[in-house]
Image (spheres, rainbow, N blue to C red):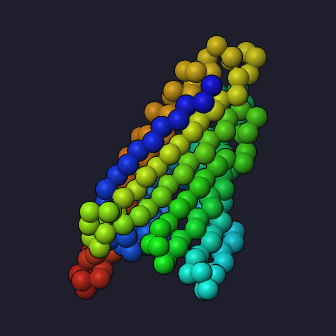
Amino acid sequence: MVRAYSQEHIYRHPWERVTSASWRKFADPMNKRALSHILEVDTLDHKLDANLGKLYTTRAITIHAPGPWFVRKIIGQDICHCIESTVVDAQSRSMQLSTRNISLQNFIEVEEKIRYDPHPDNPNSWTVCKQETSIKIKPLSALASMAEKIEQRCVEKFQSNSAKGREVMERMCKYLEAEASGISV
């Protein structure tokens, strides 16, 4: 079974500020507590296509393995490695991120897609963030009956982490706004 959910959030900040915050959220020491599930982020590749006005990046993200503690004990792994692919289109003012796990695939498959676009009603001041996440637990013979409950716990944890991520993004946007105004924070 696959659990999927989608969320939409309106940032009352311009697209340029929100996308800048997205790039900086993992590096800011103030965000370490809120994003404590993130252990490490490394840029593996980046390419700028000046003709198309697009930036392509690939990052490796190491996180605490999702799911209840007893499942992590059973599979014998506390961390999970993920790959994030990002495309920033400066001409259309769109940023799309796609993240999926590359470890623990015998047990769980997670894919998250996030898209930032100018808000259609206020494109110069607001940004729409659309997030879609799917989580699939691959039943283990001993845990087949629990797979649905584990998926639900994972969904709850991902939703909680998403809320923390939005808080971090709001804080980063306010920081960037103050920085642009010459106010020290």
Residue 45 x %, y %:
69, 72
Along the line of sight, which residue is nearer the eye, 124 or 176? 124
Along the line of sight, which residue is nearer the eye, 68 or 181? 181
Left or right: 110 with respect to 172? right
Residue at 50% over, 66% down: 95
Occupied quadrant, residue 73: top right
Along the line of sight, which residue is nearer the eye, 48 or 104? 48
* Quadrant into which the C terminus falls: bottom left
Residue at 62% over, 58% down: 84
Is any atom of residue 182 visible in this view? yes
* Quadrant into which the N terminus falls: top right
Along the line of sight, which residue is nearer the eye, 144 or 185? 144
Residue 57 x %, y %:
63, 70
Left or right: 6 with respect to 45? left
Instruction: Establish if 13 lies above or below 129.
Output: below
Residue at 50% over, 55% down: 114
Residue 98 x %, y %:
59, 55
Instruction: Establish if 141 lies above or below 61.
Output: above
How many numbered discs?
A: 0
Is any atom of residue 62 visible in this view? no
Residue at 73% over, 45% down: 103
Occupied quadrant, residue 146: top right
